[in-house]
Image (cartoon, grey):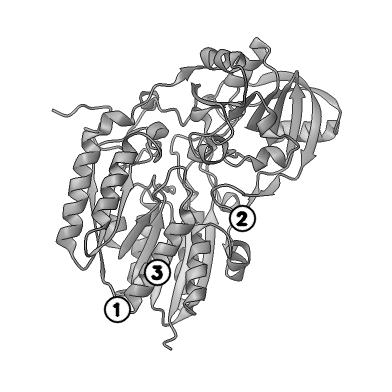
Amino acid sequence: MVGYRVIIGSMSHETNTFSTVKTTMSDFRPKYGEEIVATLRGTRSGIGGYIEVFEREEVEYIPTIAAGATPAGPLRNADYWKIVEYIKNEIKQAGKIDGVLLALHGAMVAENVPEAEGTLLREVKKLVGETPIIITLDLHGLISDMIVENCDAIFGYDTNPHVDMYERGVEAAEALMKTIRGKIKPTVAHKKLRMLPPTINQRTAEGPMVKLLETARRMEEQTGVLNVCLFPAFPYADVKRVGSAVVAVTDNDPKLAQKLADELGAQMWNLREEFLKPLTPIDEAVKTAMDAPEGPIVLADVADNPGGGAPGDGTEILRELLKKGAKNVGIACIKDPEAVQRAIEAGVKGTITMKIGAKTDDFHGEPLEVTGVVRTITDGRFIHKAMAIGVPADVGRTAVIDVNGIEIILTERSHAPNDPEVYRRNGIEPTDKKILVLKSRGHFRAAYEPFSKMVLEVDAPGLTTPNLEWFTYQNIPRPIWPFDQPD
């Protein structure tokens, strides 16, 4: 048996360039070498998929770095280059290798490096030459010429919420093995579109993505087509490479790959208006939830979504709930390290008065003074049972305070509560609540929709608002829809 050797690693960050919070290496909390295997083997993650395939195929895989952080502002320049240089050094030290497989995001920005993934791939390509490089990307990746030109195949997530990270990891790893063994020769092409739809209606269970994915699956049935994937875009990065895209990968047929990308791109452009979706005003959403005969009713704070780079400390929905006297409410989560410390000092069952939330910036309301009873204090660690199943989470020290029937989960770190385990870990059963406030745009639906009675997407202020006119863009290409209308 031929002893194949491959490099694996990940670098993932969805960068909101409007955020005032700069990202550093400490936010990434990277794992190295065998620590990656110990943590991610057997999980439903992309890296978990890589490991499963290579161990099944008895291929030697060399884990480099797994670095990912909650979305926020650009990564510090020096820290970005630490990641790049680490991967490069591991490749150099590995000696002869037969392939490279990297789990990237696609919408990462570092200080002075707007093309974070493309730059990494270019640096790797310089080292490995004709050795195949295959990558997996988030559905919200911002595809560029630099990315496409420096890899051999791209496998983007097909689901939003992203419940197929593991499947795409398996698919990419299997494609790399076929490439190494000479069974296929991947060719990648893309079509970039002058459109920047908000993320609110990029779900793959309803709306325009359903139609587009049906076309993509039909295309994949053609002989020689390896993969067709959609990237509707991440609109909160003010960089030149923004915009929706379609990527097609064929077996040594560049003309077919470009033809498919162009055709599906044209369909996406024609459906652009379907990506727009109205939101529910705060007062109307709260009243509707309170008047509902039964719950849980989910109030999605889509504009304060840590999964898109918002801090997760907005107060405006909570303010309205308190104003209207709502009861049996669970709120996940409000990032406020100062409030967590105060709650810890007060202790479980202690009563405390303090200002919470809206301490990161001026975009998410004002700090709100509350008086509540401390219900629980935890270390903030739990294991995901939705989406990235089996992957550990750590939101920092966490406290729950009960303010007149509204239980608020306060965390040290920003966290999009897409997994109900964040409630259960802190002593709250989400299915028992009349109202659940979730600081998330859409990933929560995979786990919450099965037991919720209604979901209302709320028009609160914040850095991930679908109202893109709220932002001042300086670097995006113009004209671009929806700011500019085609002639």
Q: Local crowd at mark 2 within 10 Å, few (<14), some, or many (≥20)?
A: some
Give how far across and how far down residue 285 sits, in percent: 53, 17
- Tell me the kind of residue under disc 3: Glu
The residue nearer to you, when weighing 355 against 59, is: 59
Give how far across and how far down residue 381 sits, in percent: 70, 48
Residue 480 horizontal side relative to residue 124, left or right = left
What number is the disc on residue 230?
A: none
Q: Residue at coordinates 41% horizontally, 39% vertically from top-left?
A: 205
Q: Local crowd at mark 1 within 10 Å, few (<14), some, or many (≥20)?
A: few
Position of 96 relative to 163 (above/below): below
Q: Cβ–Cβ below 8 Å for labels 3 and 2?
A: no
CA–CA distance between discs 3 and 1?
12 Å
Q: Residue at coordinates 27% horizontally, 27% vertically from top-left?
A: 483
Q: Cβ–Cβ below 8 Å for labels 1 and 2?
A: no
Secondary structure type for disc 1: loop
Residue topped by disc 1 = 182
- Tell me the kind of residue under disc 2: Gly
Residue 320 lies in quadrant:
top right
**N-terminal-most mark, 3 or 2:** 3
Residue 322 horizontal side relative to residue 283, left or right = right
Residue topped by disc 3 = 174
Give how far across and how far down residue 248 sits, in percent: 26, 56
- Tell me the kind of residue under disc 1: Gly
Q: Local crowd at mark 3 within 10 Å, few (<14), some, or many (≥20)?
A: some
Position of 170 relative to 214 (above/below): below
Residue topped by disc 2 = 390
Residue 251 lies in quadrant:
bottom left
Residue 144, visible in the rendered structure: no
Secondary structure type for disc 2: loop
